[in-house]
Amino acid sequence: MLLIMRINEDTLLEGEKVVLVPYNADHVPRYHQWMCSPELQKLTASEPLTLEQEHDMQRSWREDDDKCTFIILDKQKWADPSIPEQECMVGDVNIFLTDPSDPSLAELEIMIAVPCYRGKGLGKEVTRMMMYYGVHKLGIQKFEVKIGLDNKITIAMFKKFHFQELSISEVFREVTLGVTVNEALQKHVFGNMDFMLQREYGKARDIRQAPFTPLSL
C-alpha cells in the first residue's frame, strides 16, 4: 500500500457539478478561513489552527501514505479562467486508511464548507465519485464514516447509499456508519458513472492559467 494514497498528486476528477483537485499550498488560506468557523470546527471535530499550522497540515496530508485528499471546486466557476481557483473552493473530501492490517478498509470524510452550496446535491455527487475512485484506484472494499449525531441530513444521505449503523459514541456525539462494496452496492450507488472524467491536474491548471490571446482577424 506504500505510496498508493499519493496516487492523486496530479489527478483531477470532473463531475457534473464539481471538480475535485489535489489539496495544495494555494488552497490553504481559503481552507484556513473556513476552519476559523466555530460551526465547521464543531461539524468536523477540529481544533482551530494558525495559518502556519494549516500549511504544515497540508504538507503532511500530501506526504501521508494513508490519506487521499481532494478539494471540491464549483465546476461552473472553475470553467471560467478569470476566477482564481481558490475562489471556486466549496469544500474537501478525504479517504484515509484506518487499519494497517486491512488496506481495503477506509474512512471517508466530506465537508461542504460554503453554506450556500449545501442541499444542492454536491455531497451526493462527491460521495459517489470518491467511493468509485476508492474502489477502482485504491482497492478499497469497505467504507466507514463518522458523523455528528445532530447532522441528520448527512446521516440520511449515507443510509441511502446502503451504509449501516455500526456504533454510536455518546461521548463524542457521533455515529459510525459502514458499508461493504458488493455487486448490489456498485449497481445502486455507482450506476452509470460516465459523467465522471479523470484528467491530469497540472495540465488542466496550466491551461486555465495561460494568458488569453485574442485571435487576430
Image (cartoon, rainbow, N blue to C red):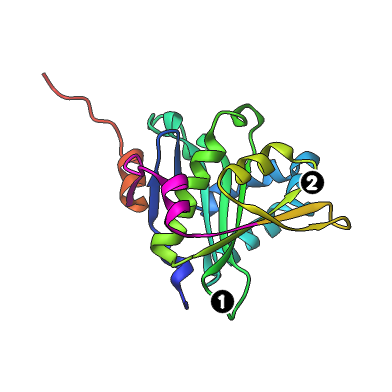
Say whether disc 2 or disc 1 marks the residue closer to the N-terminus: 1
Specify the farthest residue to the bottom: 101
Give how far apart the Cα atoms at labels 2 and 1 are: 27 Å
Can you give x and y, in whole percent of width and height, for residue 209 in the image?
Answer: 36, 40
Q: Is residue 45 left or right of residue 17?
A: right
**1 relative position to 205: left or right:** right
Which residue is found at the position 36% from the left and 45% from the top? 205
Q: Is residue 53 above or below residue 74?
A: below
Residue at 38 percent across and 58 percent down: it is: 10
Q: Which of the pair 212/95 is nearer the observer?
A: 95
What residue is shown at x 63% (from left), y 26% (from top)? 116
Camera-nearest residue between 210 and 39:
39
The tag on residue 149 is: 2
Residue 180 belongs to magenta span: yes
Measured from the top left, where is residue 46 in percent x and y? Answer: 76, 53
Image: 1 above or below 166: below
Please give the range of residues in magenta.
178-199
Secondary structure type for disc 1: loop
Q: Could you tell me which residue is drawn at 62 percent across and 31 percent down? A: 118
Q: Which residue is mark 1?
A: 102
Which secondary structure lies at badge 2?
Answer: loop
Local packing at callout 1 (Cα closer than 10 Å; few below 14, some 14-19, many 20+) is few
Quadrant location, the C terminus = top left
